[in-house]
Image (cartoon, rainbow, N blue to C red):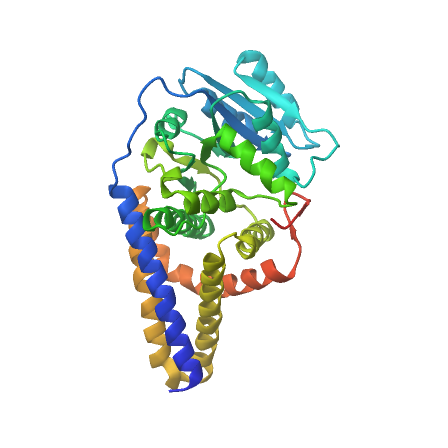
């Protein structure tokens, strides 16, 4: 057995063990009963950062405003849009006084840029106890606000919520929906297993005072803080600060990316975040996962060139597929979309090479989103 074969199997075992840990954590998260806070529930500000979202912002806000929650306001931050986003929001605000609009000026808050600055401005203008955030292209359930707010008990500081992609009959949207379910399950499983790693900004909640103190501290250090960094730092201080809300009523729905260039830019942006996580062991884990994907990809090419090497590749494939299949199966059951599992094996043919390519691009090239460079976190 060559050194390449040994390296492949060692990293495959590492990856398989990590995915098994996340699967265990995901099952653990789903089995936990959601401890709910006692009434009266805290006041809430829902924050939506919007940049050129004319086509989707009304649908998003209508779904949020349909929530029946006693003390709720909705703040939309127009992040230098050059379409009719602000006009749509103003028209809706005339119909519902719970909605208000903030338009960012050209002046910069030190360090913070883009969506980070938009959210900071909204939180700073709020007087609510809790902040809920979602994206302008999302829709929520009528009990979303209540489900997320009820998850906060005395010690809770940060709650991550579930997000799901809409999909149609096309293979392209179905593969995206399946992969995205896996990412959400990894995030929830990380919290459940005691190794928090990721969350999605389309469905987050946190205490306002905690956020302002942490963001101010990060800015003083010259850092561009991220949601995932905040999640990891809070959990390291006290695991009880962080929770995952597994209520089905807390699920946020959004559309997949509708073009290949936008999909690649989005995934490149996500991949670039990992190198800046504040937890060294988590950064090392990401490097280990990426090295496995590189070795697995090279092993696949080697099998095509030299079919006699298929046995080692098959063992590595089984170590990869089994825990991933268990995690994705649990995720599709949770989201009530089990039919997507038929795309699991076909998806692997695309996932492996694209992860290798995107991981390299996220480290080597500048990241842009919505025609704007995304700064390092």
Residue 279 visible in the displayed image: yes
Residue 152 at what x, y percent from top left?
Answer: 37, 30
Q: At 52% from the left edge and 55% from the top edge, which residue is drawn?
A: 274
User: Is residue 53 in view from this perspective?
Assistant: no
Where residue 322 sits, quadrant-wise, is bottom left
The residue sitting at 52% across, 34% down in the picture is 211
Q: Is residue 120 above or below residue 168?
A: above
Position of residue 205 relative to residue 375, above or below, is above
Q: x, y (%) of residue 282? A: 46, 57
67 to 106, vertically: above or below: above
Residue at 50% from the left image edge and 66% from the top image edge:
353
Q: Is residue 112 left or right of residue 206?
A: right
Q: Nearer the viewer, residue 167 or 93?
A: 93
- Which x, y percent locates residue 63? 46, 25
Q: Tell me the residue at 31%/48% (across/down).
A: 26
Total marks in image? 0
Q: Nearer the viewer, residue 129 or 305?
A: 129
The answer to whether residue 79 is left or right of residue 206 is: right
Quadrant containing the N terminus is bottom left
């Amino acid at each position: 057995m060559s050194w390449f074969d040994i390296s492949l199997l060692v990293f495959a075992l590492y990856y398989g063990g990590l995915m098994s840990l996340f699967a265990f954590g995901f099952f653990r998260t789903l089995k936990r009963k959601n401890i709910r806070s006692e009434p009266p529930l805290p006041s809430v500000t829902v924050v939506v950062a919007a940049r050129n979202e004319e086509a989707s912002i009304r649908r998003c806000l209508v779904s949020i405003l349909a929530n029946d929650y006693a003390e709720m306001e909705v703040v939309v931050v127009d992040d230098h849009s050059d379409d009719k986003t602000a006009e749509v929001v103003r028209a809706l605000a005339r119909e519902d006084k719970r909605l208000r609009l903030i338009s960012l000026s050209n002046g910069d808050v030190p360090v913070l840029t883009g969506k980070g600055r938009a959210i900071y401005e909204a939180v700073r203008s709020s007087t609510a106890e809790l902040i809920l955030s979602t994206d302008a292209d999302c829709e929520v359930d009528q009990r979303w606000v209540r489900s997320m707010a009820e998850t906060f008990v005395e010690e809770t500081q940060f709650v991550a919520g579930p997000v799901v992609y809409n999909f149609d009959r096309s293979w392209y949207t179905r593969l995206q929906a399946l992969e995205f379910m896996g990412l959400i399950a990894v995030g929830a499983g990380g919290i459940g297993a005691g190794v928090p790693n990721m969350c999605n900004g389309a469905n987050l909640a946190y205490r306002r005072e905690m956020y302002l103190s942490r963001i101010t501290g990060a800015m003083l250090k010259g850092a561009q803080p991220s949601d995932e960094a905040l999640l990891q730092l809070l959990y390291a201080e006290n695991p009880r600060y962080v929770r995952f809300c597994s209520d089905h009523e807390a699920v946020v729905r959004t559309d997949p990316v509708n073009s290949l260039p936008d999909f690649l830019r989005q995934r490149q942006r996500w991949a670039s975040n990992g190198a800046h996580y504040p937890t060294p062991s988590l950064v090392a884990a990401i490097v280990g996962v990426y090295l496995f994907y590189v070795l697995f990809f090279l092993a696949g090419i080697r099998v095509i060139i030299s079919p006699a090497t298929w046995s080692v590749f098959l063992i590595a494939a089984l170590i990869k597929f089994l825990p991933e299949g268990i995690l994705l199966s649990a995720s599709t059951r949770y989201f009530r979309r089990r039919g997507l599992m038929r795309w699991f094996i076909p998806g692997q043919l695309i996932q492996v090479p694209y992860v290798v390519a995107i991981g390299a691009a996220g480290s080597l090239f500048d990241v842009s989103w919505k025609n704007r460079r995304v700064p390092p976190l």
